[in-house]
Amino acid sequence: MSKSPLTTLCYIEKENQYLMMHRIKKKDDGNHDKWIGIGGHFEFGESPEECLLREVQEETGLTLTRWRFRGLVTFVSGDWEEYMCLYTADEYAGEMTECSEGQLVWVDKTQIPALNIWEGDKIFLQLLAQEHPFFSLKLVYEGDQLVEAKLDGIPMDLTQPLQ
């Protein structure tokens, strides 16, 4: 049986921008050259919020002071799966530091779809932009190709734009 990692991902907001990480520094990185939010794997015994706060502090130097749990994202690819707690945050303290895993950049939200991001990320980023209520999103990949998506258990038509 394969391991089922638990992770958090946070999109920190300011002035219609998200803090994004361009994953270009870490070796053997499944997200190499992708743009993603801030987050990582749970440590033993952590709650989702404890993982969120630790990962943001480690990767950015910032301390979140206000955040919202927005959804649960299930990723499946072959025999690998991951359960990701998705957050947004709009208040923080501290000064941003350099990250060992990638380059941190404030990106205008309208420019994010043009970046090298996972296809499934486009779905949950649109749900965040639409202020969709708390959601469960399942994303199934074959390699880098998104082949299935279900929102709150209902299959999505990947040939049509999200409404």
Image (tube, helix red, strand yellow):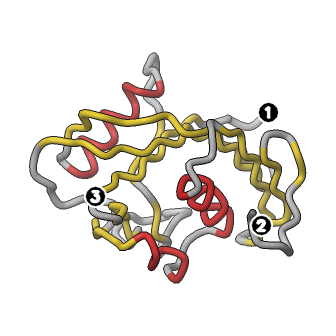
Q: Are marks 1 and 3 in contact (CB under 8 Å)?
A: no
Residue located farthest toward the top when viewing the structure as drawn: 45
State which mark lies toward you, 3 or 2: 3
Image vertical order of residue 49 relative to residue 131, above or below: above
Label 2 sits on residue: 146
- Give the class, few, some or many, for how many residues have Cα within 10 Å of label 1's Cα (few <14, many ≥20): few
Nearer to us of marks 1 and 3 is 3
Query: What residue is disc 3 on?
Result: 14
**Label 2, residues with CA under 10 Å away: few <14, some 14-19, many ≥20:** some
- Quick one: 42 or 162, which is closer to the camera? 162
Identify which amino acid the numbered label 3 is placed on: Lys
Coordinates of residue 5 in the picture (x, y in percent): 60, 37
- Quadrant of the image occupied by residue 146: bottom right
Q: Dot 3 lies on which element?
A: strand
Question: Separation of disc 1 and disc 3 at Cα?
Answer: 41 Å
> Tag 1: residue type?
Met
133 and 52: which one is in front? 133
Secondary structure under tag 2 reads strand
Q: Which label number is shown at residue 101?
A: none
- Amino acid beneath label 2: Leu
Between 112 and 28, the one lying in front of the other is 112
Tell me the crowding category of disc 3: few under 14, some 14 to 19, or many 20 or more residues within 10 angstroms, Cα based.
Answer: some
Residue at 24% in and 33% down: 65
Image quarter of the C terminus: bottom right
Residue at left offset 74%, top offset 65% = 162
N-terminal of the pair, mark 2 or mark 1, is 1
- As drawn, the label of residue 1 is 1
Residue sitting at x 76%, y 47% = 138
Mark 3 and mark 2 in contact? Answer it, CB < 8 Å: no
Element on which disc 1 rests: loop
